Image (spheres, grey):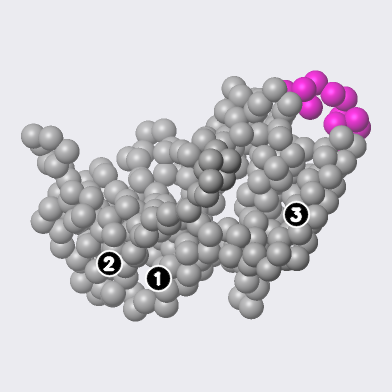
Amino acid sequence: MPTYRVLMYSTPDAIQRLGGSAAVSELDEAVIEVAGITDDQLAVEYPPESSSSGSKVMHRLGWARSKLKAIGLLDNSERGVWSLNAEGTRFLDMKRDAAVDALLAADRDARARALKARRERDDQDDEADRPGDAQAPESAWKQELLGKLKEMDPTAFERLAKRLLREAGFINLTVTPASGDDGIDGVGAYKPSLVSFPIYFQCKRHKGSVGPGVVRDFRGAMTGRGEKGIIITTGAFTPAARKEATRDGAPPIDLIDGDDLCDLLKDYGLGLEVKERVVEEVTLKPEFFDSV
């Protein structure tokens, strides 16, 4: 299995091949190709008792991006687009052995700084603001939400998906009876302007990864009924599944993974309460004391 350090070396190369920037899905696909990762390696998942879930390689791809950002080689936007910065480009201009040595040294320095910062915050008993926690505030609520979603009854999860689609503008939603859905859980009409068209959807409460077979089967079930479909899952889609969803010559399938699902539920206020935190800022006014 490739370590995240190996993937750290392949990631800047993959971004450069994609033109200097890339969305996560296309970046993952490119790194897998650059690093020579096999389907068998992609299929290795964390055991059920692990705190992580899904493909180990996909998890390490995320770690590699985070590490590269921490050492200043990559930037990412709020929309999840990753790009090479000047330092990242300079790294690619180095010879391989020198680049690997520089990368490992930068990673060690970044981890040492993070450890020092964590210890300083521990000394101050500032537990609420500890950046060293593996679960950042955003990912923490998403993990909690995904855990709740995975515990839901399948029928209740379908109802939730139906509610979400209604909030997003779908009308005339119906849920297909479980006995004869052929992989289709429901259908609704989406009307962005004057014309509406049917969109079929499938809901899958997955703890791991969803592969291309699920996408192919769903598209097959749609044949003769419509050409627009959405698959909603609590898990993650493999790069092969995302490639299959946009395969040339086949009806495209929109994919909503667990992370996207959490964001949508938050955006539409379904099961989540968002509170804005007000930070008190205190500024000394020395002139007041001078005039006393």
Residue receiving disc 2: 160
Q: Nearer the viewer, mark 3 or mark 2?
A: 3
Residue 247 place in picture, x, y as percent: 43, 38
Question: What stretch of residues is rendered in magenta?
Answer: 89-100
On the picture, is 41 further left or further right than 237? Answer: right
Kind of residue at badge 3: Ala
Q: Say which of 139 and 244 sits in front.
A: 139
Q: Nearer the viewer, mark 3 or mark 1?
A: 3
Kind of residue at badge 2: Leu
Q: Gap in Å between the C-alphas at discs 3 and 2?
A: 42 Å
Q: Gap in Å between the C-alphas at discs 2 and 1?
A: 9 Å
Residue 239 painted magenta: no
Q: Gap in Å between the C-alphas at discs 3 and 1?
A: 35 Å
Q: Which residue does the image show at 42% across and 39% down from the upper left? A: 246
Q: Say which of 246 and 154 sits in front.
A: 154
Residue receiving disc 3: 117
Q: Which residue does the image show at 65% across and 28% down from the upper left? A: 84
Contact between labelled residues 1 and 2, with CB atoms less than 8 Å apart: yes
Contact between labelled residues 1 and 3, with CB atoms less than 8 Å apart: no
Residue 160 place in picture, x, y as percent: 27, 67
Residue receiving disc 1: 149
When asked about the image quadrant of residue 218, the answer is: bottom left
Residue 215 seen: no
Q: Residue furthest front?
A: 292
Residue 95 painted magenta: yes
Above or below, comparing residue 27 to residue 185 in the picture:
above
Residue 12 place in picture, x, y as percent: 70, 32
Residue 94 place in picture, x, y as percent: 84, 24
Q: Residue furthest left?
A: 194
Magenta span: chief secondary structure: helix
Q: Secondary structure at mark 1?
A: helix
Kind of residue at badge 1: Leu
